[in-house]
Amino acid sequence: MNADAITYTESIGQFPSINRKSPAIKSPGLTKAEDAVLSRLRSGNEGAFDELVNKHHSTLIRMAMSYVADREVAEEVVQDTWMAVIESLDRFEGRSSLRTWICGILIHKAKDRGVREKRHTTFSAFESSDDDNEEAVDPSRFQQSGEWAGHWAFPPQPWDDRTPEKLLASQQAVNAMQQAIEALPATLKEVLILRDVEGIEAKEVCEMLKITETNLYVRLHRARERVRQAVETYLGGRTRAV
Amino acid sequence: MAQEASKSVDEEITCREVVEWTSAYLDEHVGEDRKQQIALHLAVCAGCETYVKQIAYVRDLVRLLPQVLDSPAESEQVRQAVAAKLRRQ
């Protein structure tokens, strides 16, 4: 099991408290800025906490909404996360970055809450499933047999005049993309949010989610492909057979 | 680096396989041999070139979509709750 998972899940009551006056040695996972914030947090500096909230709160809300459907529930999860961060500060050993650690706590709480919420609601008709064995693109878009087996039968049509700027300027295109993202199952949404929306490096995303890089790219590609399909459908891009 | 599939990079890659590698390729998380193999395929396959371009657009667009944000009132509520906790410690 990843050491960072142990750091949070087993840290409550099991690791010895880190002495607040322990020497100011930078822990390996922390950036210099994070190390400074951590020292100030441990000395009870409220300004340091304000900085941390300003920096990460929006990210945590977006991440929480990958796991729970309701904004209000997401806010509760994030508030619980911040409380847990303060309670566990002494036990944080700095093996990962502060951001990875905080996000790890959030994911743990959000998943737990998401499971509890699902027990009381019916499965949403709008939430799609994710099957590990599915390919990202419908196999029927490729030649199934013959000399050209595996090559495009129905290739995508170019979006030549639809630059990213033009797509963003179209409310319908934006709605189509946002709906596609909303419909993603949690396992795909979380990687899209962390990697593409938040711009977090692949290695750190893998640490947060406790997955391999291979898993990350399989999931990320599926997520991106579903958004691509939404744009293709919006553009009326029914493909032509080659 | 994303784990390489069992197929050797010496064998010709199909469009179906290029599609599955696209995100790792765009983020430069494939080995050098696989990268060259895909690049060569893209040079001769308009369908895959279009596909890769569209996935790159999506990757870049998603970040620019209007995002869920926290509200100032909510952040303030969090700050006050935690500040109270800090004072009790």
Image: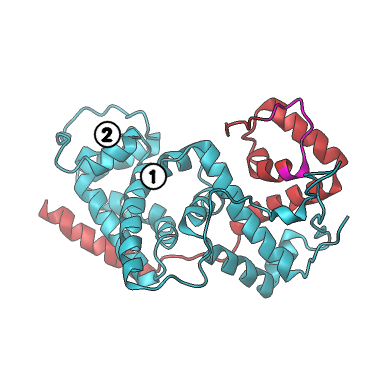
Chain colours: A cyan, B red
The residues bearing labels 1 and 2 have C-alpha atoms spaced at a distance of 13 Å
**Residue at (85, 47) in percent of width and height:** B46
Note whether residue A51 is visible. Answer: no
The chain to which mark 1 is attached is A
Q: Which of A173 and A59 is in front in this view?
A: A173
Q: Which of A211 and A47 is in front in this view?
A: A211
Q: Would residue A115 appear left or right of B56 to someone viewing this image?
A: left
Q: What residue type is labelled 1?
A: Arg
Quadrant assignment for the C terminus of chain A: bottom right
Q: Give the range drawn in magenta.
A: B7-16
Magenta portion: prevailing SS class: loop
Q: Which amino acid does label 2 sit on?
A: Glu
Please say whether residue A203 is one of the residues in the magenta stretch: no
The residue pinned by badge 1 equals A99
**Residue at (14, 55) in percent of width and height:** B87
Across and down, in percent, residue A44 comes to 20, 47
> What numbered label is drawn on residue A93?
2
**Residue at (64, 70) in percent of width and height:** A176
